[in-house]
Image: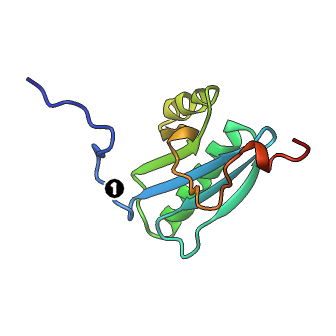
């Protein structure tokens, strides 16, 4: 019997010296892309129009800059939070040799420490 798949364990070790890692915060019109790029002292942050071609150009530019800094980039990995309509981008990126990971919004842990309970007494005019 083959071992079962465990999505919580990476199948590929992360080599930060050869992996460009980017995350995308998506809105209707603008996307904010932050990255960790091998050979960069800084972590770049760029706001782009909501366009996958622009994202791919930016990732390739960062890869070229890492190569110019003397680093070999073997993997480009992108992660982003998306609802039911965000999976098209992952498929598109994967078709362009970019690893893409979609994070479902409900799977992100959120602190509930400062949230008030919604009771009838806390609703005005009731």
Q: Residue 97's x, y, as percent?
A: 47, 37
The mark tally for this picture is: 1
Q: How is the image coloured?
A: rainbow
Position of residue 64 relative to residue 117, above or below, is below
Q: Quadrant of residue 82?
A: top right
Mark 1 lies on a secondary structure that is loop
Task: Pinpoint residue 99: horizontal percent, then vertical percent.
Answer: 46, 40
Outermost residue to the right: 125
Q: Residues within 10 Å of mark 1 (few under 14, many from 20)?
A: few
Residue 19's quadrant in the figure? bottom left
Which of 2/121 is in front? Answer: 121
Q: Quadrant of the N terminus?
A: top left
Is residue 66 depicted above or below 125 in this figure?
below
Residue shown at 49% from the left, 55% from the top = 21
Q: Is 22 in front, or is 111? A: 111
What residue sits 54% from the left and 37% below the top? 104
Residue at position x 60%, y 32% from top?
89
Task: Give the labeled residue for mark 1.
Answer: 14
Give me the residue at 49% from left, 33% from top.
94
Residue 7: image location, x then y, percent: 33, 38
As rendered, which of 71 and 94 lies closer to the eye? Answer: 94
Left-right relation of 44 to 6: right
Q: Is residue 7 left or right of residue 25?
A: left
Residue most extreme to the bottom: 41
Q: Is residue 9 above or below residue 86?
A: below
């Amino acid at each position: 019997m083959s071992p079962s798949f465990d999505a919580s364990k990476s199948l590929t070790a992360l080599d930060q010296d050869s992996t460009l890692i980017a995350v995308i915060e998506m809105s209707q019109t603008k996307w904010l892309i932050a990255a960790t790029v091998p050979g960069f002292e800084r972590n770049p942050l760029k706001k782009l129009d909501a366009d996958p071609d622009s994202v791919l150009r930016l990732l390739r530019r960062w890869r070229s800059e890492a190569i110019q800094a003397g680093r070999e980039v073997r993997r480009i990995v992108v992660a982003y939070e998306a609802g039911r309509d965000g999976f098209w981008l992952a498929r598109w990126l994967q078709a362009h040799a970019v690893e893409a990971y979609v994070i479902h919004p409900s799977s992100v842990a959120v602190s509930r420490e400062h949230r008030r309970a919604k009771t009838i007494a806390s609703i005005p005019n009731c």
